Image (cartoon, coloured by chain):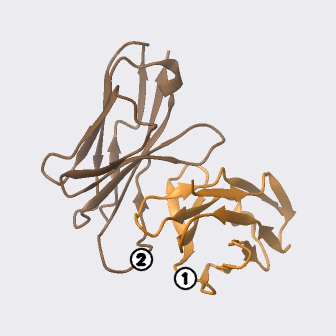
Chain colours: A orange, B brown
Amino acid sequence: GDSVTQMEGPVTLSEEAFLTINCTYTATGYPSLFWYVQYPGEGLQLLLKATKADDKGSNKGFEATYRKETTSFHLEKGSVQVSDSAVYFCALSPPNTDKLIFGTGTRLQVFP
Amino acid sequence: DTGVSQNPRHKITKRGQNVTFRCDPISEHNRLYWYRQTLGQGPEFLTYFQNEAQLEKSRLLSDRFSAERPKGSFSTLEIQRTEQGDSAMYLCASTSTSIRRGETQYFGPGTRLLVL
């Protein structure tokens, strides 16, 4: 079945460091891909998404590119801030349904 | 801003009791989803509605679980004869149906259930 695998955390970085959180997926057809973020004490919210191959999603300095050939959707940010500390979830939506299939989440901790 | 709301936010119950959760989606959204999230895991899909029709149910949804959306607005999720393994965060999300793929789902704050 369809699934998402993302790197285990926690990822611990100093402020202004470069961030990569790896995400790979298994799916039939062409799913839509998402990154959701959960800040401490808050609900899940969409960070960015891409709906077809080679699309790049971006928001708040974060980027991810839909790579069909490597079935990946890695999340990157050039310079993280303390306020980026949160849990990040990679997810896919199969082409025949809008339900989301999530990875296990990666906790990011950014220190000043 | 009327986002997705869920009630109650927290529920503690004893094993064997029945519990019911409510979700109020964003008013113009016709699709409503339920997910379950356990500690250290990502949310897992349970079921979804388009208007009042329940279109898909996960195999995770045992016969002790039932969900309704009687008028296509709010939804309830009932768990009968709760077990300790039902302890989790129950999340509701909503979105609009459109011809575009990958519509954003908007999540509520969740209901945290603890079964003693």
Q: Nearer the viewer, residue A5 or B78?
A: A5
- Kind of residue at disc 1: Lys
Q: Which residue is mark 2?
A: B101
SS at badge 2: loop
Q: Residue at x 80, y 51 (%)?
A: A10
Whether residue A90 appears in this view of the structure is: yes
**B65 over A1 or under it: above or below:** above
Q: Quadrant of the N terminus of chain B?
A: bottom left
Percent of width and height locating residue B77: 31, 37
Q: Is the residue B84 above or below the residue A75 in the image?
A: above
Question: Does the rendering let one see residue A87?
Answer: no
**Is A96 situated left or right of A22 in this image?**
left
Q: Are marks 2 and 1 in contact (CB under 8 Å)?
A: yes
User: Residue tagged by mark 1?
Assistant: A52
Residue B32's mark?
A: none
Pick the residue in front: B111 or B38: B38
Q: Chain of mark 2?
A: B
Residue at 26% across, 65% down: B29
